[in-house]
Image (tube, rainbow, N blue to C red):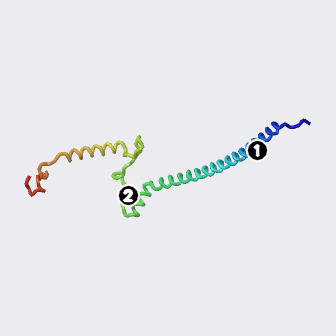
């Protein structure tokens, strides 16, 4: 048997420490992986529950938006039911805003411009006379 040199002993100790350190790192990595797996499973469970809640809420909205439900709710509040004359359909505009249907938007814009044009025309019979210097006792 040959004698063990000091360098060989030192290398054996260093490599043993590296091996033990690597084993600790491997165990820690396995623990972290398990924690991530548990967190992922929990998030998937929450996701499934949220999807179920979303489907249930969509069904409630569909049921509530039926004309019979709207009329029944209005009757409970002693109101008249919705008719086509006073119902407006809203859509999502390309930029993400909620807006009226294009036909309704054109009608509203036309009414607005007509209303502005009529306001700008002042009937001389109904015009209010302007009063100058009213704050100074009628003197200017």
| 36 or 76: nearer the viewer | 36
Residue ID for mark 2 = 81
Q: Quadrant of the N terminus?
A: top right
Question: Image quarter for residue 82?
Answer: bottom left
Q: How many marks?
A: 2
Frontmost residue, 20 versus 102: 20
Residue found at the very far left of the displayed protein: 139
Left/right placement of residue 18 relative to residue 62 reads: right
Q: Residues within 10 Å of mark 2 (few under 14, many from 20)?
A: some
> Which residue is at a point 13% across and 51% down the rendered structure image?
127
Foreground mark, 2 or 1, reads 1
Quadrant of res 19? top right
Residue 116 relative to residue 41: left or right:
left
The dot on residue 72 is none
Mark 1, Cα crowd under 10 Å, few <14 / some 14-19 / many 20+, is few
Task: Name the secondary structure under disc 1.
Answer: helix
Question: Which badge, 2 or 1, comes first in the chain's sequence?
Answer: 1
Residue 20: assigned label: 1
**Residue pictured at 53% horizontal, 54% vertical:** 56
**Residue 134 locus on image (x, y percent):** 11, 56
Query: What residue lies at 46% left-to-right and 56% top-to-bottom?
Result: 64
In the depicted structure, whether residue 20 falls above or below residue 79 = above
């Amino acid at each position: 048997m040959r004698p063990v040199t000091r360098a060989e002993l030192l290398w054996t100790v260093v490599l043993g420490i590296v091996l033990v350190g690597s084993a600790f790192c491997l165990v820690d990595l396995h623990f972290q992986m398990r924690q991530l797996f548990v967190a992922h499973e929990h998030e998937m469970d929450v996701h499934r529950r949220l999807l179920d809640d979303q489907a249930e809420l969509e069904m409630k909205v569909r049921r509530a938006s039926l004309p019979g439900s709207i009329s029944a709710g209005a009757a409970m509040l002693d109101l008249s039911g919705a008719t086509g004359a006073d119902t407006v359909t809203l859509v999502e505009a390309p930029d993400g805003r909620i807006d009226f249907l294009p036909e309704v938007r054109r009608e509203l814009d036309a009414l607005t411009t007509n209303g502005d044009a009529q306001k700008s025309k002042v009937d001389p019979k109904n015009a209010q006379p302007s009063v100058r210097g009213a704050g100074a006792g009628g003197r200017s």
